[in-house]
Each structure stands twice: as C-alpha cells, then as structure tokens.
Amino acid sequence: MSAAVEFAVWAPVPERVRLQVEGSVHEMRREEGGWWRAEVEAGPEADYGFLLGDDDTPRPDPRSRRQPEGVHGLSRCHDPASHEWGDHAWTGRPLAGGVVYEMHVGTFTPEGTLDAAIGKLDHLVDLGVDFVELLPVNGFDGTHNWGYDGVLWYAVQENYGGPAAYQRFVDACHQRGLGVLQDVVYNHLGPSGNYLPLFMPIFSEGGANTWGSSVNLSGPDSDEVRRYILDNALMWLRDMHVDGLRLDAVHALVDERATHVLEEMAQEVDRLSVALGRPLTLIAESDLNDPRMVTPRVANGTGIHAQWSDDFHHALHSVLTGEGQGYYGDFAAAGLSGLAKTLTGAYFHDGTWSSFRRRHHGRPVDTALLPGWKFLGYLQDHDQIGNRAVGDRVSASLSPGLLAVGATLVLTSPFTPMLFMGEEWGASTPWQFFTSHTDPEIGRATAEGRKGEFAEHGWDADEVPDPQDPETFTRSKLDWSEVEREPHARLLATTRALLALRRQHPDLVDPDLSRVEVAWDDEDRWLVVHRGALRVVANLSGDAREVDLDRAATGVLLATGDEPGLAGTTVTMPAESAAVLTTAGRQPREHRSERQRARSGPGRGGRPEGTA
C-alpha cells in the first residue's frame, strides 16, 4: 500500500539530483547545506535510487537500510520499527565482569546467515559468555568478505539475511541473556561499490591510511560527514537494540578538531544510554597505547569505555609459541616478564622503545585510576589469525596442554576476556583472508598484493591462499562436529569450567590492576598470577615443575591436566598445564623460599620492573 514518503539525501557535490522510485523519476529540490528532498508516493518496501547530475544510472542511498541486489543495485525501503521486539525484559549489561565472543556470521555456521547463527546461540549460553561481537555486517561487494570492505554502513549484508534477520538475531541473543556488540568501520571504505564520493566529500584531501583515503573528519564540509558517522553509530544502538560498538582501527581516524569525533561519539552514546535506560558500550581498536582513550571525559579523557589489548595478546602468543618475528620481537625478547608486565599494567610499550616501529611508543596506565576491564584480553582474534599468511590458528602449532594454559591465562586475567569463534574447542579449521570482489581487476590486485606482501617476509607465494578462491572462504568455516571429538571436547570442557569459575569467584573478575602480582621463572617456564586469595599457576614447560608460592595452597579449583601436587607453599605442576588454587592467609613476603627469591630478581613476586 503506497503512502507519501519523504526521501532526503545529503549530496553537495552534484548540481542536480533526481529520485527514481519503482521505475518513475522525480526531480528533487535542493535545500540549504547541500540536502535534497522530494515527497512521493511509495510502498513500504519500494526500490529506489538517486540519479546524480546528468548520469541516468541510479545510485544507492548512502543511508540505505537494505540492498537486496547488492551494493551496486537499488536501495529498498525498510522500516526498523516494523520488527516486533521480544526483548522487553532485557535491561542490558555492563561490559565490566563480562566475557566477549567474537563471531564472523559468514563462517560461524555452514549456512553463513544470521538466522543459522541463532541456532547456535544455546552453545554460547552453555559456554558461559556474556556478549557476542559480530564482525562488520554492513553492505560490501560480493557474497563473502571479512566485512572490512564495507561501502554502505547503514545496510546489513543481504547474504546474511538483511536488516530483518539482524533484528531477529539481536532479539534472540537478548532473550537468552546475551548482549550484542557490533564491529563498525569508520576509518575507510571498501574498494568496490563506494559511490559516496559522487554524493559528498567523504574523503579528506591528500589524506590516506593503510586501507585507502582517509575519511574527512575535519576538513571543509566535514560537519555532515561526521554526522553521517555519528548517526550510524546511534542507529545500531537505537534501532537495532545493539548493546555496544567495536570501533575499528581508531588510530586511523585523522581528526584535527579540538573535540575528536570519538569524544563526540562517546558523549552522544552516553546520552542515548540514559534515554534508553540500559548500558551502551564503545570499544576501540587502538594502536596508540594511550590510556586517555579509555579515560572518562570528566577526567579529560576521550570517554571510550574500553579498548582491545594487542600487547597482552603479543606477550601471551610469543611465550606460548616462541614466535619472535615482526612485532613479536620485543615481546619474545622480554619472555615471561613481558607477559607479567601486561598482566599488571595492560601495556607493554608504555613509553618504551619499540623495535618494530623504530621509535618509543605508548605511555603508562595509571592502575590506581583505570580498571582492567577497560582492556579486552585475548589469545586469538580475527586479525591475529586471518592476517597470518595461511590463516592458521594457534591450535595448528600448540599442544592441547598449551592451548588450555593459554585459555586459563586469558579467562583468569584482570581484563575483559575475548574468545574468537571456535577457540573454545581448539578448532582445527583455519580462518583465512577471503574476498569476493566482483570487479576482476580489484580481485586480481587483492590476490597479487596478498601474495606479494608475504613473499617479502619469506613465505612461498604458492602457500598463501588466494583470497578470491571460493575454497579459501569454505575452508574458514567452523567444523561443528569437532566439539564432540578429542582433544576438542576436553578443551571445551576446560573453557566452560573456567568461565563458570569467573562467575563463582569474585577474585577472578576483580579489575583492580594494582592488586595483581606476578611471579615467574623464564628458565623453568612457569608463571604465577595472584588473583586475590587465588593463585593461577601455569607451567609452560614440557616437564613437571616445582613452583614456590607466597602462601600455602589449600585446594585445587581447576586443573587443566593431571592434578597438581600440593605441599605447603610448593606446588608440583604437571608439564604444560595450569591450575587455579585456593590459598591460606597471606604470609610475610620474607617467608618466600630461597629458591624463589634467587630467581625473582627485580620486581619478581610483585610488579614487574619498569611498571608504575
């Protein structure tokens, strides 16, 4: 049934804009500020597009909610209010104390759709996570992609089910007690299907980052570009009932204004949170190692609520795998002391020399002011797997024992833990870089660039998967039959048990970084993390180790391998295992054994040397 509908678009670039709706064309009137409007009769699911200048090819709406024929086709009207929500009892939940599960819709299930993902949500509930974080779902060219080549930020990829399926997914999560975080990309646009420059000055003049031209955040006519971004952020939280956003690579957002776009976004999101009556969270992916990013605005920070912590990942990855190439170099050289430093101060590079960057990097976190939950800690994520030459997970190189040790250190850390889909059972499937660009030249350039990049680092180009090969995408899908087979079933049981412990023992969710102490021994390869009255003991060695504690162990809450032997303040740990122990009352620090004191060195048994 048709009704009068007002169509509007911000398009200061063309001198003329016409509206095409269901085959008919209408002139639009230009208003102040570069906006164009027209009121016409249209159905609730009418297909439409804009004709710019003298071009008779209709272009999709920059704020399109649905693209049934892909990013090159017409937009389709979609009213988000048409969904009948069933999550009325959902009041949201804060990020603090929660656990995040990162998911790529296209490879999470064989079908690769949002509706199919709903069928696996009970697995996540049984696992014990609190949030599902979706990789970008906005409109991209082709049928499969990581999501970071998106060009229509307001639309949900049709292959995933479109916006209606997205609302069903969020609704289903909330009805199961799961929050939803959405990964969004505001620092660049994909190489194919981006028609925004025909409408608006979306890019800054002369600015560029790793992925292409920089978005115009502070140049001429940037007010509406910023509004385009801010309105998109609010759309996910308001119209789609999302509980938070993960902001991709915010260090690539070049903004020379006195009020950075991230600060403006944090302010508007906080206002919306009050209006909706539920917590809303912004999580930055930031390479800056600047604690001001997650410092509240009242303390002169940016006001972003949390950030990913790559330093913790790099430190943990290097000690578990022994890898020391590229950006792992400094972490591998530091050994367990580097991991201890991140566990107590979040950043490894906190003003120190970074050999990878060839400069000093970062500044210290004031652990008296910033809690650990503001930093997401993980052993794996989509970048750290997919950006390896063959997309191999750590399960391809680590033993089942060390996989369990890694899970223990992540899930008992003072941070907000994050798991990448399938990590909970040590999935053997890779997660490779895949694309489906419809433009042959872009597809060829992507494939050749990928192979050339890794060939420069010593990889055989023939070993690097072709991102345009459909098999690269198919190989990256999870194999759900693994959850019932060993050694996967045992790791899954361990992950569930660790998540249950977090809910049962407040010490394991205590975010006070100033209370975390770490003891370690690089020679014998063991580590002890003090979590209140609990001790998390990890033996990374291939041999059993005797580890001296600062107080007597009284019981074992969890062991990833054979039961450790307890004898007063000494615990005998089986090879490649971890345990969470209860302890007796605190003993004076001078009662530590001579063996532990001899191997402690500066900062051992407490905070690592060089931390605040």
Image (cartoon, helix red, strand yellow):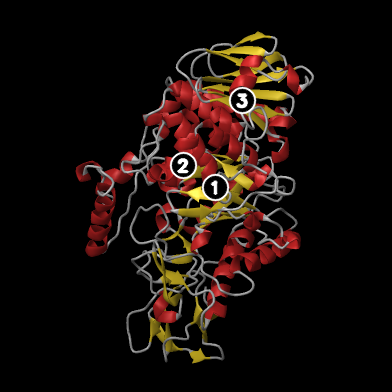
* Disc nearer the start of the sequence (2/1): 2
* Helix, strand or loop status at disc 2: helix
Q: Kindly tell me whether residue 284 is visible in this rendering.
A: yes
Please identify, in this view, whether the residue under mark 3 or under mark 2 is nearer the observer.
3
Q: Kindly tell me whether residue 4 is visible in this rendering.
A: no
Q: What residue is disc 3 on?
A: 600
Work out whether residue 166 or residue 26 is closer to the camera in this orientation and state it. 166
* Helix, strand or loop status at disc 3: helix
| Vertical comparison of 249 with 366: above or below | below
Q: What residue is disc 2 on?
A: 330
x and y percent of residue 580 in the render? 64, 21
Distance from disc 3 to disc 2, alpha carbons, whole Å, reads 21 Å
Work out whether residue 462 or residue 108 is closer to the camera in this orientation and state it. 462
Left or right, residue 2 beside residue 458: right
Crowding at mark 3 (Cα within 10 Å: few <14, some 14-19, many 20+): some
Write the residue at 22% across / 62% down. Answer: 440
Left or right, residue 261 beside residue 475: right
Write the residue at 51% across / 91% down. Answer: 30
Q: What residue type is labelled 2?
A: Asp
x and y percent of residue 362 in the render? 56, 53
